């Protein structure tokens, strides 16, 4: 069976562990230091204002790396995951980015999920009540009683409930799943490679090319002239 679900544990890109205000700040700072140390005179004149950060490119690569990690860790009842799309809120006051995907469930997914629920009934009863009970500032659109989930999971085959139960299955297998997915993604992506020169920065380096103090220059990223 194929169903579209929200991928659990994705933290989004708004002040999260995947991206926050420190991400471009330190990436630019480190690249600027590298330019100043390794390049000739024009690079020493560069300032942080001469560098910028490719948010879109960075986020796309991090997102792909995160999904790759999710594929490696998703429960065996999920046989494939395709068609990943990200939605973002107009304002980040109360929401963040979400990932959606079409997942193919094995033919025996209902039996396996029923077995998981039965084997973890007490934990699920407490966890579902805690996670999905409305309170001041939070309006739940999910049942907070585990005994009512069977109808939504196996009769309606509601993607919201399937997604959440897959998340519970992954969490019971590894309580550090959220952090592991983030760390896997960040280990595969170097933020510094998404720092680029602004037009003003390019002008400074191009001026150095004209006077001969810079021997090699790539308009997208400085090709530092290394010395033996």
Image: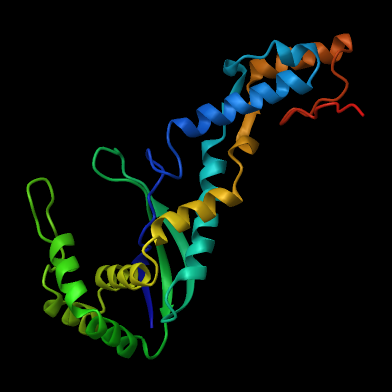
The percent position of residue 111, horizontal first and vertical second, equals: 31, 90
74 above or below 182?
below
Q: Nearer the viewer, residue 4 or 19?
A: 19
The percent position of residue 182, horizontal first and vertical second, equals: 46, 52
The percent position of residue 38, horizontal first and vertical second, equals: 78, 23
- Picture residue at 70% right of the left edge, 25% below the top: 34
Q: Nearer the viewer, residue 41 or 207?
A: 41
- Picture residue at 38% right of the left edge, 83% below the top: 1
37 above or below 196?
above
- Picture residue at 47% right of the left edge, 69% below the top: 73
> How many numbered marks are there?
0
Figure coloring: rainbow
The quarter of the rendered structure image containing the C terminus is: top right
Q: Nearer the viewer, residue 31 or 96?
A: 31
207 above or below 57?
above
Q: Is residue 121 left or right of residue 5?
A: left
- Picture residue at 62% right of the left edge, 31% below the top: 195
For the view shown, which residue lies furthest in the right direction? Answer: 228
Q: Nearer the viewer, residue 9 or 209?
A: 9
The percent position of residue 206, horizontal first and vertical second, equals: 78, 16
Q: Quadrant of residue 100?
A: bottom left
Q: Is residue 144 left or right of residue 62?
A: left
């Amino acid at each position: 069976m194929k169903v579209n679900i929200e991928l659990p544990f994705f933290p989004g890109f708004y002040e999260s562990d995947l991206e926050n205000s420190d991400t471009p700040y330190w990436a630019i700072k480190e690249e600027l230091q590298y330019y100043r140390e390794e390049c000739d005179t024009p690079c020493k004149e560069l300032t942080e204002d001469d560098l910028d950060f490719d948010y879109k490119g960075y986020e796309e690569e991090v997102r792909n790396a995160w999904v790759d990690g999710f594929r490696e860790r998703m429960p065996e009842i999920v046989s494939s995951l395709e068609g990943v799309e990200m939605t973002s809120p107009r304002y980040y006051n109360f929401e963040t980015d979400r990932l959606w995907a079409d997942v193919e469930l094995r033919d025996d997914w209902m039996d396996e999920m029923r077995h998981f629920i039965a084997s973890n009934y007490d934990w699920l009863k407490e966890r579902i009540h805690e996670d999905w009970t409305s309170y001041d500032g939070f309006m739940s659109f999910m049942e907070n009683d585990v005994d009512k989930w069977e109808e939504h999971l196996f009769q309606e085959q509601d993607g919201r409930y399937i997604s959440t139960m897959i998340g519970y299955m992954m969490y019971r297998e590894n309580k550090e799943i959220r952090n592991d997915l983030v760390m896997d993604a960040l280990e595969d992506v170097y933020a510094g490679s998404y720092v680029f020169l602004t037009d003003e920065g390019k002008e400074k380096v191009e001026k150095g090319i004209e006077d001969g103090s810079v021997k090699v220059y790539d308009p997208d990223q400085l090709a530092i002239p290394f010395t033996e």
